[in-house]
Amino acid sequence: MSIKENKALKPILAAVAGSALTVMVYSFVLDPSAGSDGAGEPAEKKPLYWVAPMDANYRRDEPGLSPMGMDLVPVYAEGASGGPDEGPGTIRISPDVVNNLGVRTFTAQRKEMSSTIKTVGYVGYDEDQLVHIHPRVEGWVEQLYVKSSGDPVEEGQPLYEIYSPTLVNAQEEMVVALGRNNGQLIRASEDRLKALQLPENAIAVLKETKQIQQTVTFYAPKSGVVDNLNIRQGFFVKPGTTMMSIGNLDQVWVEAEVFESQASLVEQGIPVSMTVDYLPGEEWQGQVDYIQPALDDMTRTMKVRLRFDNQDGILKPNMFAQVELDPQANSESLIVPKDAVIRTGDNDRVVLALDEGSFKSVAVDVGRVDDQYFEILSGIDAGERVVVSAQFLLDSESSKASDFKRMDHGDEMNEGPTSGWTSGTINEIDLEKGTVNLSHERIEAFNMMGMTMNFVVVDGVDINTLEAGMTLEVEVSKGDGPMYEITDVKMDDQEMVHSQMDHAAMGHDMESAFEQKGGWTTGKINSIDVDARKVNVSHGAIKEIPMMAMTMGFGVADDVDMSLLSEELSLPIEVTMTGEGEFTITDIAVANPVHWTDATLNSVDIENRKANFKHAAIKNIGMMAMTMDFTIAPYVDMSSMVEGSDVQIIVHMPSEGVFEVTHIRPKPAE
């Protein structure tokens, strides 16, 4: 069966989204008299009819299953089911649907937020104890007693021996002054030798023996380890040459980076804990020693210096460390779980759980965030219940990309044109119910794409003149109920063939109607038919077509490898409208589990689809750990990307020098 032949089973799209949603979700006004009879006893709630959850046009007078195999949902008279009235946007869901969706709630409360800051750092020398060795004369290194960086040295241990004409001349001046027994010259010569850093013992030997040393040995000024050894035996050196450094490892510094959004929490002296991969299970305790006054202009982070004792010398310079800073909470905050907040590019929302199965989406202002909670600055009060699961379905299954106002169609249905003309072919006629099943073309007045659906035929149109297979022009109007109505028809005495219709007069162009267009979204695969190359997918909204979020069947293009697909798999898909009511998956983006890389999201540029990450080494493209900007793939939902969050990413290199994030997800808990 082709995709086109299966159109009758496809969910209602685009402009009829309001009808489908109002079956499960209802805006209502509380009727104080509803729910009781004259005697004060509760009135029995009786459904008006039952409808399919995904197709409001499929009605039955008793419970049963929809064509898609889903339980029919009861529809009650407006206000008959009671419930609180919380104004526009309040919705009601029947208890069985609430149960099937697995709705869970959390009561907003005030408590101290965990302000622990997790970051990374690098071990370095205590620079207060770091000594740099420079010569004060020109000369040649005749003997080098330390051979490599990292060699331990003790205070007073010889480091190098140098021949310097300047030192020889200074010694000769000292010998001449001693020969003349001129106290003033002796003091001046001795001061010069000290200024040239001639060791004290060498000056004493010179005074005693009056013998000039052609080479002079210099000694370690303190104990430690040699670092930055920049000379070898025979090198010519001069003032300004950094010959080597000597560092002490009894205490080390760790330089960590803190995001700009967390900088206000960091204070000098707060406790810090640190672990290193080199010694799993070991933990060091220290404190914040110094906070840099300026942010790094490349990474937009603030550098913090930490100090740790290292008497046993286990910590080595340039080690990579995981650091946790523990700022003290100053006050209680109103908090809700992170899962409860729906984040978009325009605002942040939570879904309030009201009484008796009623829900309402409200905008909130969020503040700080930790591993579990968001701080709520305004929008809700303590004690109110928020939805922490299934809120995406409550938001028309469009998650964080659509506006919750689609749940309340009361005003939208009255805006714009109320009728429009199109052409179509009659598939079935139900004289008893007064309905026809019609495959129609695009209705410009409603911005409704072509599809197959049921219509009510009003009394003014003689349904007996209609026949299955007939092609005609119809006027479609928005009725008072959930179904659209056919209020007028145009047909010749003989059946009009589709190619003879004046499409320009109907306000649509056949070429543009079948112009292929598509876009990316994320979907979850429910079932796969490899032989027919079809899949059933629950997907998000596709604004390029446009198509609302729903569950439906798709054909799969021949160049898509179906062996990569499996049931329950969630992945980005590209959907293309290949004809009126025909939709095909033309591309997929499957995540290879071994390519996930840990990263921290520093900044997000939604307009240019770029983001800055500090990431670990990316093995699949051979990239070392660093901080840099990445292009974000077009199907990745950037509205859910939160600056400062720990995530995992998959990066591909589509062309030389171009690095693209193709997948992103929250970092799984350890």
Image (cartoon, helix red, strand yellow):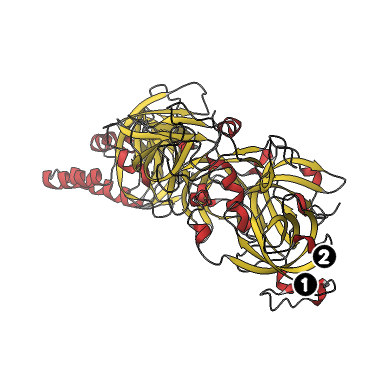
**Looking at the image, which residue is at 28% across and 37% down?**
267
Residue in the picture at 50% in, 36% down: 81
Asked whether 54 or 30 is in front, the reply is 30
Residue 274: percent from left, percent from top: 42, 28
- Residues 555 and 301: in front is 555
Q: Is residue 610 above or below residue 305?
A: below
Residue toward you, 281 or 650: 650
**Residue ID at (78%, 55%):** 429
Whether tag 2 and tag 1 are in contact, CB under 8 A, the answer is: yes
Which image quarter: residue 197?
top left
The numbered mark at residue 180 is none
Q: Residue 530 appears at what percent x and percent y?
A: 84, 44
Answer yes or no: is residue 21 visible.
yes
At 23% across and 37% down in the image, what residue appears?
Answer: 207
Which residue is labeled 1 in the image? 491
Q: Reading the chain from its start, which is encountered first: label 2 or label 1?
A: 2
Q: Amino acid at mark 2?
A: Met
Q: Secondary structure at mark 1?
A: loop
